[in-house]
Image (tube, rainbow, N blue to C red):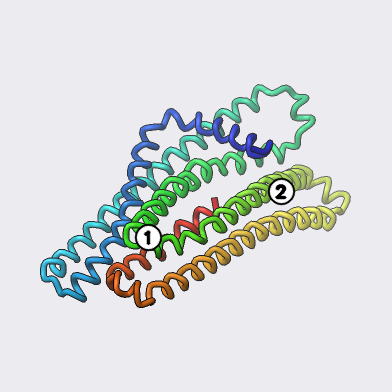
């Protein structure tokens, strides 16, 4: 493990300690995410009897029950989605509130020499902007890690159950996708750190200009201060565009790899030997599982 990874792990462990008092909300939200992930696999599984039983065999019982199963599945999905989203958001805001309160109390106790050596703009940025980023770590990232990872695992298990050969063909793209995720995560971490620094610079320049507005007018340096702010603001915009470009590129590449896997699966599935061993419902259910997996895989790459 590199020094940066070790440092990130240590910081995240400290963050999790702030979430311990709210473990009940986290447990309920996690349980809801398990149910939500299960509905993804269940929907793919329903495609098989829907195609084979309703359209091919025209089974009256399946035709009658399928609408009830679908509605029931999405009722469970909706409840699970609300509980997990609200529960994690509640916990995340509690953590942000505690961190910001503790940081403010700490700032009140620091000696004057500390403020002499640190920009008030940077300190305000850390109190307002940096602490706010904790919400992303304690809610969005956790949601993706738990819910989307469970969804991917469930869908892969279902694909293996349907047809091992087709599933292994799809999984051939796995190592490349893992490599992309690791690369993107490292790049995101570097850019995100620089964005936080640039936000501090913007706050610092703004705070100085607002606090010294009379001096600026007396000496007529409005153009200088405007150019200074523009450069700082442009640096922040450039970093945010780097983040966007990285995310968009990774998503496009992963989708291309997935499309190549799908093309290979379609080719194998249409071979004479394979056509004799799988039903229409099995193939449709397999493709549905692949399509349902694209969203979670995309979100995992943006953690």
Residue that carries the numbered disc 2 in the rendered image: 198
The quadrant the N terminus occupies is top right
Residue 281 left/right relative to 238: left
In the rendered image, residue 71, in percent from the top left (x then y), is placed at: 22, 61
> Neighbour class for label 2 at 10 Å: few (<14), some, many (≥20)?
many
Distance in Å between CA atoms under marks 1 and 2: 50 Å
Residue neighbourhood size for the residue with mark 1, other residues' Cα within 10 Å, grouped as few (<14), some (14–19), many (≥20): few
The residue nearer to you, when weighing 267 against 134, is 267
In the image, is residue 243 above or below residue 85?
A: below
Residue 259 lies, in percent from the top left, at 49, 70
Of the residues under marks 1 and 2, which one precedes in the sequence? 1
Residue 237 vertical placement versus 14 (above, below):
below
Q: Residue 210 at x, y = what percent?
A: 73, 46
Query: In the depicted view, which residue is nearer to us: 105 or 17?
Result: 17
Q: Quadrant of residue 279?
A: bottom left
Residue found at x 37% / y 46%: 84
Seen from the viewer's position, the closer of residues 224 and 142 is 142
Where residue 98 sits in the image (x, y, percent)?
A: 51, 31
Q: Which residue sits furthest right?
A: 219
């Amino acid at each position: 493990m590199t020094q940066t990874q070790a440092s990130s792990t240590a910081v995240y462990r400290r963050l999790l300690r702030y979430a311990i008092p709210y473990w009940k909300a986290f447990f309920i939200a996690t349980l809801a995410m398990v149910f939500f992930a299960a509905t993804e696999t269940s929907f793919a599984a329903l495609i098989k009897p829907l195609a084979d039983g309703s359209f091919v065999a025209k089974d009256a019982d399946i035709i009658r029950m399928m609408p009830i199963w679908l509605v029931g599945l999405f009722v469970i999905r909706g409840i699970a989605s609300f509980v997990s989203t609200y529960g994690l958001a509640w916990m995340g805001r509690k953590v942000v509130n505690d961190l910001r309160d503790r940081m403010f109390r700490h700032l009140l106790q620091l000696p004057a020499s500390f403020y002499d050596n640190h920009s008030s703009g940077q300190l305000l940025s850390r109190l307002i902007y940096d602490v706010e980023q904790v919400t992303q770590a304690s809610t969005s990232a956790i949601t993706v890690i738990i819910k989307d990872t469970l969804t991917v695992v469930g869908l892969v298990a279902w694909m293996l159950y349907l047809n091992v050969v087709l599933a292994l063909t799809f999984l051939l793209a796995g190592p490349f996708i893992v490599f992309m995720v690791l690369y993107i995560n490292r790049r995101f971490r570097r850019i995100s750190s620089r964005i936080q620094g640039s936000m501090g610079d913007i706050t610092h320049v703004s705070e100085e200009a607002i606090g010294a507005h009379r001096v600026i007018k007396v000496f007529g340096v409005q153009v200088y201060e405007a150019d200074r702010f523009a450069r700082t603001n442009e640096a922040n915009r450039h970093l945010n565009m780097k983040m966007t470009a990285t995310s968009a590129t990774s998503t496009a590449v992963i989708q291309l790899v997935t499309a190549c896997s799908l093309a290979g699966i379609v080719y194998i599935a249409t071979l004479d030997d394979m056509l004799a061993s799988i039903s229409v419902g099995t193939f449709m259910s397999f493709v549905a599982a692949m399509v349902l997996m694209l969203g979670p895989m995309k979100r995992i790459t943006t953690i």
